[in-house]
Amino acid sequence: MNKQNVIVIGAGPAGIFTALELYNKFGDDYAVTVVDEGLAIDRRHCPARQKGQCVRCKPCNIMSGWAGAGAFSDGKLSLSEEVGGNVTDYLSVDKTRELIRYADSIYLQYGAPETVFGLNDRKVEEISYECSKHNIHLVPCPVRHMGTEYSYEVLKNMYDALLKKPGFTFLERTHADPIIQDGRAVGAVLATRGKEPVEVFADYIVAAPGRGGAAWLNKIAKENNIHVTNNEVDIGVRVEVPNSVMDDLTKHLYEAKMVYYSDTFENKVRTFCMNPGGIVSEEHYDEEFSDSFNKKSIAVVNGHSYADEGSHTQNTNFALLVSTKFTEPFNQPIEYGRYIAQLGNMLTGGGIVVQRLGDLLMGRRTDKTRLAKSTTVPTLKTAVPGDLSFVLPHRHLTSIIEALRAFDKVAPGLYSKNTLLYGVEVKFYSSKIDVDENFRTAIDGLYAIGDGAGITRGLMQASVTGVVVARDIAERTEA
Ligand SMILES: Cc1cc2nc3c(=O)[nH]c(=O)nc-3n(C[C@H](O)[C@H](O)[C@H](O)COP(=O)(O)OP(=O)(O)OC[C@H]3O[C@@H](n4cnc5c(N)ncnc54)[C@H](O)[C@@H]3O)c2cc1C
């Protein structure tokens, strides 16, 4: 392959928006190669979603390939700078808002639905007022909900459009490592599965490896003296209840982002990724995305829903996460999260645990018989009934129970014996790679963006980081 203008490592939303904006700036002949360890979007299939059984694809088809973790995501585009990442740590609020509006217009251009939830100010204010009575902070955030099927279509439309550019190349099943010479990124070693690795040179390298690639990026940063800061690690459960419990909130907000500081530990507990009529799912992080001693692949829980009402279930699910930021001397928050997830996996023979809240409160395991009595019917059929108190630390479990009790005041029925808790849900935002306001690292020519760089946590802000990098490359090229 000839020398490229830009190599983008990772084809998630951050990488895709880098490529889209580069073509917007430079025209169709600009030489951009995007590589990803996973497959092209039209070849990505999650057997668990079709057959209900995870077969442990390597790499995981939910997390890897064109569109990254976004392909089968619920496609909720958070249109507030307060949600989905920390871009405002790098750019002003106004600039971030402007970039969100711009990225949103690109999603619309490629087929995202027009409807935006959470814009009915009066009702949102009423809910917020009610929350305030119970020490709950409601984070205001309009959401454009693409749903899993539109999310896939929109990101596929972007793929099809980029493939038409003469300068564009996408390499699937390809692991990339940047080549750094004399303090400058000059290219990447591209190792396509089944082929000899090749060195490809480029003017700029953009690392957008997502959460699954955070440990890999961390390692590269450490090897090259790029400063890295611990981020928090969010550990918790996925909660599943009948739609009737959450309807009043989800009808108006789609996603009620609520924050509660737990009574015993004053830990931040927040709801995240709410899926009305959705299903709970299982995803995997592979062992290669780990450093140090803890090399095993882990199964963690997640959730999604379809925009098409015909595909809706009777249940709403959401994550309930406890944020922990470690100070010193401990500096392995990713490993901490992995370790806890592995405990859950250990008890189930490698999968996800599910427990009724009632059983948890009574200090007993949920078994098949007790689960069969639950009026909330689990949507993740492969989850193994068990006991989360063997898995989650006391601090986390207590905080989760206290938050559920508080949220029950605005969603009556939540603190019920038949509320299902699936474990473990872990969000690895660890290790913020030190970058400037254009997401340049200390290595000349190397950018780090998206979830993997610890900057973002969602589709919209990940997309925004890609736009910023492409514009910076355009400015540097003009200068
Ligand atoms: C099930 C699920 C549902 C979600 N729902 C939502 C939602 O509704 N709304 C929302 O805002 N966010 C959601 N998210 C989060 C969202 O998908 C991510 O925030 C977003 O995809 C991050 O984008 P990214 O480009 O930074 O990384 P990713 O999308 O994770 O993409 C990174 C890509 O890099 C590749 N890669 C990593 N390392 C290498 C390497 N060395 N060489 C080659 N390739 C590499 C990976 O294979 C992966 O494809 C969801 C995530 C999941 C898993």
Image (cartoon, helix red, strand yellow):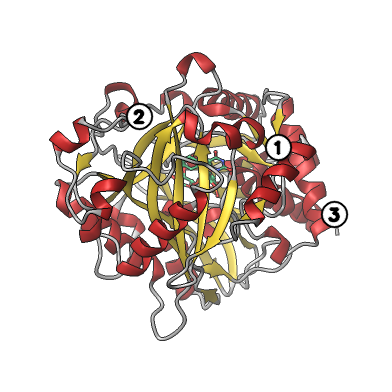
Number of numbered discs on residues: 3
Who is closer to the viewer here, 410 or 109?
A: 410
Secondary element under disc 3, as helix, strand or loop, is helix
Q: In terms of depth relative to the viewer, which is nearer, 115 or 5?
A: 115
What residue is shown with label 3?
478
Which numbered dot is residue 118? Answer: 1
Q: Earlier in the sequence, mark 1 or mark 2?
A: 2
Quadrant occupied by the C terminus: bottom right
For the question of whether residue 348 can be seen, the reply is yes
* Residue type, numbered disc 3: Glu
**What's the amino acid at mark 1?**
Gly
Residue 227: quadrant of the picture: bottom right
- Within-10-Å neighbours for mark 3: few <14, some 14–19, many 20+: few
Residue identifier under label 2: 46
Gap between marks 3 and 1 measured at Cα: 41 Å
Q: Is residue 185 left or right of residue 321?
A: right
**Relative depth, front residue between 59 and 394:** 394
Mark with earlier residue (3, 1): 1
x and y percentages locating residue 8 in the rendered image: 57, 48
Pick the front one: 271 or 362: 362
Can the viewer see residue 22? Answer: no
Q: Earlier in the sequence, mark 2 or mark 3?
A: 2
The picture places residue 162, in percent across and down from the top left corner, at 64, 30
For residue 136, above or below residue 307: below
Q: Residue 189, position in %: x, y?
A: 45, 54
At 32% from the left and 38% from the top, the residue drawn is 418
Look at label 2 and name its amino acid: Cys
What residue lies at 36% left-to-right and 57% top-to-bottom? Answer: 289
Single out the mark in the foreground, 2 or 3. 2
- Res 226 → quadrant: bottom right
Give the Cα distance between marks 1 and 2. 31 Å
Does residue 30 sit above or below 209 in this rendering?
Answer: above
